[in-house]
Image (cartoon, grey):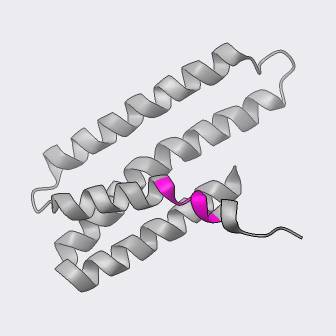
């Protein structure tokens, strides 16, 4: 889980760099904020799952689904807060950064492990 979250952070930084080259500072900030709207809830969800594994009886399907619901609610909340609070928002960069972070785990599928 830590590898996925760290890969999402690296992908978010890369999306921010590309957005900066294409659209300037507001686009970079928008792309990074979009990526963070995905990364932060995933990191909190991973931390919650990691903590529940080490407590007897705490890991259950209900725990997973409640955590997943919280993750989705946080993601929607962060996206809404970003749209409301950041006035120079570049929507294509925000959505691009979000999608890049969201789909960055695909890179791990193609990586050969030894």
Q: Is residue 73 positioned above or below 58 on the image?
A: below
Residue drawn at point x = 66 percent, y = 40 percent: 47
Looking at the rendering, which quadrant does residue 84 occupy? top left
Judged from this view, the residue extending furthest toward the left is 87
Q: Which is more toward the observer, 52 or 104? A: 104
Tell me if 19 is positioned left or right of 101 in this view. Answer: left
Q: What kind of secondary structure does the magenta stretch mostly adopt?
A: helix
Q: Residue 24, can we see it?
A: no
Looking at the rendering, which quadrant does residue 88 occupy? bottom left
Q: Is residue 13 positioned above or below 50 on the image?
A: below
Tell me if 36 is positioned left or right of 61 in this view. Answer: left
Q: Locate residue 81, reporting x and y percent.
A: 23, 42
Looking at the rendering, which quadrant does residue 57 occupy? top right
Q: Residue 86, can we see it?
A: yes
Residue drawn at point x = 26 percent, y = 80 percent: 20
Q: How many marks?
A: 0
Residue drawn at point x = 59 percent, y = 20 percent: 65
Q: Which is more toward the observer, 23 or 74? A: 23
Judged from this view, the residue extending furthest toward the front is 110
Q: Locate residue 5, reporting x and y percent.
A: 60, 55
Quadrant (top left/top right/bottom left/bottom right) for the C terminus: bottom right
Tell me if 53 is positioned left or right of 29 in this view. Answer: right
Q: Is residue 25 positioned above or below 40 on the image?
A: below
Residue drawn at point x = 38 percent, y = 49 percent: 37
Tell me if 97 is positioned left or right of 68 in this view. Answer: left
Q: Locate residue 9, reporting x and y percent.
A: 52, 64
Q: Locate residue 104, reporting x and y percent.
A: 53, 60
2 magenta-colored: no
Which span of residues is magenta-colored? Answer: 103-107
């Amino acid at each position: 889980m830590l590898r996925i979250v760290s890969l999402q952070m690296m992908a978010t930084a890369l999306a921010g760099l590309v957005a900066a080259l294409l659209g300037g500072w507001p686009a970079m900030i928008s792309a990074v904020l979009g990526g963070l709207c995905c990364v932060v809830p995933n990191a909190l969800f991973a931390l919650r799952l990691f903590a529940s594994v080490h407590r007897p009886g705490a890991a259950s399907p209900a725990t997973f689904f409640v955590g997943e619901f919280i993750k989705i609610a946080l993601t929607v909340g962060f996206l809404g807060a970003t749209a409301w609070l950041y006035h120079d928002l570049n929507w294509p960069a925000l959505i691009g950064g979000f999608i890049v972070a969201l789909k960055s785990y695909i890179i791990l599928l193609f990586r050969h492990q030894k």
